[in-house]
Amino acid sequence: MEIVHVDTKLRREFGPPALFSDRIEELLLDLHPDPSLAAQFIQKTHRDQAVQACRQMSEHQINTERFQSNSCGLNHVEGGWPKDINPNEMEQTIRFRKKVEKDDGYINSILQLGSVMEHRIKQNNSIDIYQQYFDEEEEVEEIQEPPSAKTINVFRDPNELKRTITGLSWHPDGGRKLAAAYSCLEFQKTSRNTSLDSYIWDIENPNHPEVTLKPASLLVCLDYNPKDSHTLVGGCYNGQIAYWDTRKGSQPVEYSSMEHSHRDPVYKIIWLQSKTGTDAFSASTDGQILWWDVRKLSEPTERLVLDPSREGNLDRALGAISLEFEATMPTKFMVGTEQGLVVSCNRKAKTPAEKIVCTYDGHHGPIYALQRNPFFPKNFLTVGDWTARIWSEDIKESSIMWSKYQMSYLMDACWSPVRPSIFFTVKMDGMLDIWDILFKQSDPTLSLKVCDKPLYSLRVQDNGRLVACGSQSGEATLLEICSGLSTLQKNEKSLVAAMFERETKREKILEARQREIRLKERSRSEQSKDDETGREDDEEDSEQLIAKVESDFYSLVEAEFRRRQRREETPQEHNKEVKNGVETDETEDETGETRK
């Protein structure tokens, strides 16, 4: 049922009807402007508004569902043989070849394929596909883009109890894999349910690790062999050294013996440059540097105690926490200690005392990172307490460049392998800092908040484009930095060399001035000591003179007293003396004077 509402109204209430007709225009009213009213007008302010004649777009980021893939390997030995022919049997293969070669179809197919192959060979000989056509043209300078970096992948610890990533190592062939050492360095914070596994990740697949490493104790550090990409060496929390060959599974191939291993956790292990490619050396907070041959890990091949007094006393040894070895300097290596000292050593010295060459003192706490500049090996980078410092081997007293004190601890650092002026640092507040010393020295060129947890480890890929950061929560974050920070700039090497040389000269001048001031103070102190000694001698001479005068005075008084006593006992007599025929009477009065 529809509801209808009707509104009625009388016709007369609508008013008279409107009648329209054409007529000539008529002026009813003409209002002229009043100039007096212009003063009361309010001028409206003009505003410029830009209008873009295009459709507005919005940008959103989403994480799409990742396609999970499995890596499978195929070992192709030799194919194309029938099932009844064994390729390993020489007689069967020869018999089958003779049978096929006698077939008419074989000859025809060879003739057809031969003409096609001949045509392709002639093409290759006539055209050089590798010819460079534009070598002589000048390269167009790229537009300088602002420094930036973006997160590519995050590799998370698959265990429930998260552990800290204390060590990272890139695969030497192409850097498509990343090895991470998982450990817990906090004292007595490891529970029984903590997993001991460490992992090797494929950077394209963050869902599952490609290889699982199963050590007997938590891994603190590990390193890929640069000569053999299938082998790794790692340092354990219990002081042992473990050696892996990934072709033989997850279990270590060999361990070092507990009797000859470190007494504390192995904080750093590095492969050495050798002909066999099996030599490595490790550092620990027990104060020892041990050299190993992974073919025989039962005992170290060499041992060095970091005793600053050069006596080899392990009780006074400095705890080692970082290592540096440069392949271009096979006999030299450097050690960063818990006490803030960098110890420069020479492995080929004749005696253990001569192996410790010198020390560099500049940090208030442990030196967590130590690395030489890949372009200028005489300059090296250290990270400790709240600062990053750049040193020169020629200056022992002070670093040549340093950052200002940060608000949180710096935990790791490394140089860029492609640009000599850039280095990276990570901090306890989860920040990654990228420094360009040619651009500015006081502040980082780019600072990124990688995560909310402290960052403990850092490694840069060999091409300088990918950076991996390990956090306390077991996350390895992979970042890609922009091309401006990963491409060698024009004249960069010469500019950095000039900067290092200038800063080294400046520090040498300051060091010489400081040495001169110390020498003057020493001479002044020695002179003051001589003056005090002379003053004491003068005081002794004056005291002796006074004592002598006093003794002479008392002796004179005593002699005068005796003489008076004798005079009182003998009666006074007049003595007559005749001098030159003149008679004189001489008498003495009470004062002892002679009167004539």
Image (tube, helix red, strand yellow):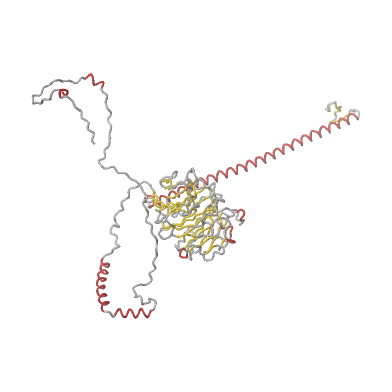
Image position, residue 346 (x, y; %)? 54, 58
Q: Is residue 596 visible?
A: no
- Which image quadrant for residue 66? bottom left
Q: Is residue 65 visible?
A: yes
Viewed as shown, does residue 86 lie left or right of 571?
Answer: left
- Which image quadrant for residue 76? bottom left
Q: Quadrant of the C terminus?
A: top right
Image position, residue 360 (x, y; %)? 53, 50
Q: Quadrant of the N terminus?
A: top left
Q: Is residue 555 above or below residue 115?
A: above
Image position, residue 561 (x, y; %)? 85, 31
- Name the residue nearer the viewer: 225 or 42: 42
- Name the residue nearer the viewer: 435 or 356: 435
Q: Is residue 573 above or below residue 380?
A: above
- Name the residue nearer the viewer: 349 or 6: 6
Q: Is residue 121 above or below residue 515?
A: below
Give the number of marks: 0
Image position, residue 98 (x, y; %)? 32, 80
Viewed as shown, does residue 118 lie left or right of 342?
Answer: left
Viewed as shown, does residue 289 lie left or right of 23?
Answer: right
